[in-house]
Amino acid sequence: MSVERAGKAILTELSLTAEPAQITALLGPNGAGKTTSIRCCTGLMTPDSGSVHIFGKEPEAATAQGLVGVMPQHTGAWSGIKPLELLAFLAGQHAHPLPVAELARELGIDAFARTPYRRLSGGQQQLVNLAGALIGRPALVFLDEPTAGLDPHVRRRVWDLVRRLRESGVAVLLTTHAMDEAESLADRVWIIDCGRVTVSGTVPELTATQSLEDVFLEVTSGDVS
Ligand SMILES: Nc1ncnc2c1ncn2[C@@H]1O[C@H](COP(=O)(O)OP(=O)(O)OP(=O)(O)O)[C@@H](O)[C@H]1O
């Protein structure tokens, strides 16, 4: 797919896939087009050319059927709503949601369940956003920098959860700037630069002779102009 905004190419013939029961990492420098790709895949943005298929459906239809979960990098302010209230509300939008209390316990949300969303720390808000993405039991989940700003304990908890999603057959597509995270979690890695795929492969393929960070630095310019 290709996307142009304000006369500038943001994505150029970008093509990638994410398979069920796999963790797919989408890597790229700041401004490379990762979030834009996710927005196109979830129907929030329409590519100027090309198409997106989610289990054979258009993104809007797949999202409407609850097949897709999204953890955005930033949410709008959820204001004064408390985490469990928010998750119960989101659960109500789905036919077969996960049990709210169980998910909240698993992610450690219980500890700050009584604090209004806007007063939560950045990391706590991240966990609530992650729970919100998973509550509807999606078959495909987009996690945009799910562990950015999380402490090492919480990061490991999120990693375990992401691995369990894979084990249960979910297709996980995540973005991250942490190369150790991609190496540890991902089955397949796609590296993009200036809206184009520059390299893709399994972690063992990409790291046969050098670290993933070295590969990243080699195949990306970091030039977003
Ligand atoms: N609606 C829009 N209008 C104009 N430019 C846009 C629009 N949406 C995104 N862009 C530009 O597209 C480029 C890619 O942005 P995007 O958020 O996809 O990057 P990213 O890879 O997710 O970056 P980061 O790692 O910093 O989160 C940026 O230069 C951004 O300014």
Image: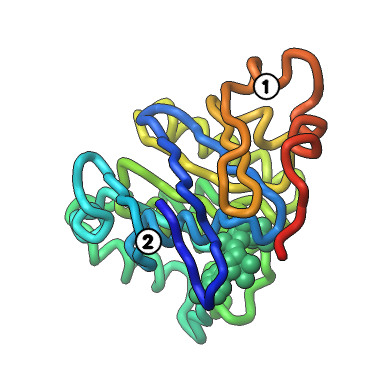
Task: Report whether residue 73 is seen.
Answer: no
- The quarter holding residue 200 reads top right
* Callout 2: SS: loop
Relative to 175, say whether 120 is above or below.
Answer: below
Q: Measure the alpha-carbon separation of dots 2 and 1.
A: 29 Å
Q: Give whichever of 218, 135 is nearer the camera.
A: 218
Identify the residue position indicated by label 2 in the image: 47
N-term-proximal mark, 2 vs 1: 2
In-front residue for pair 185/59: 59
Q: Position of residue 184 (x, y in %)?
A: 66, 28
Q: Which residue corresponds to mark 1?
A: 206
Q: Where is residue 89 in the image (x, y as percent from the top left)?
A: 32, 71
Q: Which amino acid does label 1 sit on?
A: Leu
Image quadrant of ligand 1?
Answer: bottom right
Q: Which residue is at a point 82% across and 31% down the rendered structure image?
A: 214
Q: Residues within 10 Å of mark 1 (few under 14, many from 20)?
A: some
Near-viewer residue (77 or 210): 210
Vertical relation: 35 (above or below) 188: below
Asked which secondary structure carries label 1, the reply is helix
Residue 202, x across and y down, in percent = 58, 21
